[in-house]
Image: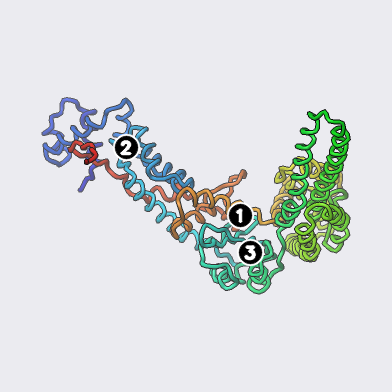
Amino acid sequence: MKINIRERCQKVSQCFKEAVDLSRRDIAKILGISKSSVQRHLTSQFRRQKYPESYFWETAEGQEWLRLLVFGVIYCFGIKGGIGAGSLSIFFHLLHLEQHIGCSPNAIRTIEVQLKTKIIDYEQEQSKACHGSAPISICVGADETFFGLPILVAIELASGFIFSEVECENRTYETWWKQVGSWFAPEQWNCRFMVSDGAKALVKLALSGLNCPTVPDVFHMLQDFSKSIGGTISLQQARLQKESVALMVKTSPGSKTQLLAVQAQQLQVETDHQDYHASLHALSQSIHPFHIKTGESQMGMELQAQLQPHLSILERLSQTYSPTKSQAALDRWKRQIPCLSGVLHAWWQWVLQALCAHNQDPEIYNWVLNCLLPWVYWHQQTQKTRQPQLKQNYEQAAKSARERFLADDCTQNLTSSEQQQWIDWAIWMCAKFQRTSSAVEGRNGYLSGLHHSGRGFTEQTLKVLTIVHNFDIKRDDGTTAAQRLFEQPFPDLFEWVVPRMGELPRPRRTFKTPKSKKPTP
């Protein structure tokens, strides 16, 4: 039986441990190799054991742990973190591993390519389990990011699963549909709505390609006000503060009068700044399937009346601060109100269909709609929101909804297990309400850092990053995007790949003394 070099080294070491008085000849007979080979292995082993911990890497356990270490470092920091092979080579040398494995930059690049190939094999194998008998309802977010050629990104917003992430020459509707059409099949997917920044190609993709309503991105629409009114107010505050400080040190007769005038302007700008923030928060709090104060359902028909008072305040402020840009933002909001109502209508239609499929009891039906969903929804919003004022308002809404939930007779009559089943269903359903493409924006930011670190993407690298995002990156609850979308477990990506990798490269040893390079005259 043929024995590889690593096994020979381990067997030679084991022979000496079990019987120290064995000669080279005896060991050679036991292993079936020549006496000179035994001596060569022993010499190499002696050369490798330069450090106190070196003996561990000669054992079978040490070799297995070393494989995990090397593959894990290259996977986490090389592939997922974008760290270069040169830096990883230095890291392995600092761990005194250069005598045990090949850790040159070229060797590390070879391992990284092998890992990427196995990751693609993993995705091809798991894709067979991603096809169910019934179509899966989804809500899609789409956008593009630029590092030269645009990278078109389409994500299922509730689960975070990336459907397509490809570098293309342009971002026309035909190009978008070519990428989306490669995975979208009506018998497998039922797209409820698509969130985008309102680009014409994306609107057409939703209406004509995915055959679903198009929803404007609330984040982008609020950002329009921030760039126009908010930015101008901040500049005005900074200018008045600078003038106020300059006038305070002056002693001329008219400086006091000028200071009072500047302070009056500061007070007015500060009042406008508070009105501006209050209006933005009110706009954000209005676009929800439940009223934040009453907890009652909001189907979308009354959204116009909810938004109009706050848009009127912003319209008044726009006359003073950046009238051209802010007016364009106001016009966009007024045009998009029907589409914003559409996301509420689409989500409620989704809720009612899913609820009817799970339950036929009218009492349970009303309890879920009026008590359970409001509490779960506002609780989720509290967890997602970081802005202090919004978080406080959402916490109050969640508290009021929870009190109504606990006080309802149906809550008292259901068992704990039945309650938990309905709570899990409500968590799943409330996660489907998506009004921003923040998942796409976060993905674009992640790609931006990796693109800068690696000086570009190859087609294989971008595909591998997509697979890692779908099947390896976990949320706080320990689930991956694929598990959340397909509602089934998948094998751990890294644990699946490691057994399929070959042996670690052996260290290369040269007997030539490196010559220092001297400058030639």
Whether residue 352 is visible: no
> Measuring 57% from the left and 58% from the top, which residue is drawn there?
145
- Classify residue 429 as left or right of residue 312: left
Image quadrant assignment for residue 171 = bottom right
Q: What's the CA distance linking mark 3 and mark 2?
A: 47 Å
Q: Position of residue 341 (x, y in %)?
A: 79, 63
Is 395 placed above or below 346 here? above
Residue closest to the eye, 235 or 169: 235
Residue 521, given in percent of the width and then of the height, sits at: 22, 41
Q: Assign a secondary structure to mark 3.
A: strand
168 vs 443, nearest the viewer: 168
Tally of numbered discs: 3
Which label sits on residue 160?
1
Label 2, secondary structure: give it: helix
Badge 3 is on which residue? 136
On the question of residue 286 being in view, the answer is yes
Query: Which amino acid, by three-letter code, is at mark 3?
Result: Ile
- The residue labelled by disc 2 is 60
Marks 1 and 3, how far apart in space? 14 Å
